[in-house]
Amino acid sequence: MDKKFHLVIVTPGKEVFEGPVTSIIAPGSEGYLGVLYNHAPLITGLKKGKLMIDMPSRGRIEMIIDSGFMEVLNNVVTILVDRIESEVLSGISKV
């Protein structure tokens, strides 16, 4: 069974997503990086690129993000980004 952790994605205008996930692949400032359950604490810059999120009930969703930051702490991941491409979000709603 996949272990879940909590993800929050926020832009300056609103909270875009909040809910349980099983993995994240994010465009870090030094290259793509993955996050799983019990990841070590981390704060990193993000650059424009594809953010991939695996959800327990919906499978993988992908979105294009602009630059921002990601914090991983105690199985909670917070992603703060300047902008998310709206057409990619059409099938995603806040959970």
Image (cartoon, grey):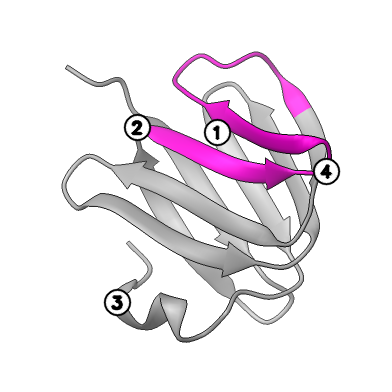
Q: Which mark is residue 91?
A: 3
Q: Which mark is residue 22?
A: 2
Residue 21 image point, x, y percent: 36, 39
Upstream in the sequence, badge 1 or badge 3? 1
Please name which of the two marks, 1 or 4, marks the residue nearer to the observer: 4
Question: Marks 3 and 2: CB-CB under 8 Å?
Answer: no
Magenta highlight on residue 28: yes
Tell me the distance, in whole angstroms, between the alpha carbons under discs 1 and 2. 11 Å
Please name which of the two marks, 3 or 4, marks the residue nearer to the observer: 4
Question: Marks 1 and 2: CB-CB under 8 Å?
Answer: no
Residue 52 image point, x, y percent: 46, 49
Position of 73 with respect to 87 (left or right) is: right
Name the residue tied to disc 4. Answer: 29
Residue at (52, 25) in percent of width and height: 75
Q: Which mark is residue 76?
A: 1
Please name which of the two marks, 4 or 2, marks the residue nearer to the observer: 4
Neighbours of disc 1 within 10 Å: few (<14), some (14-19), many (20+): many
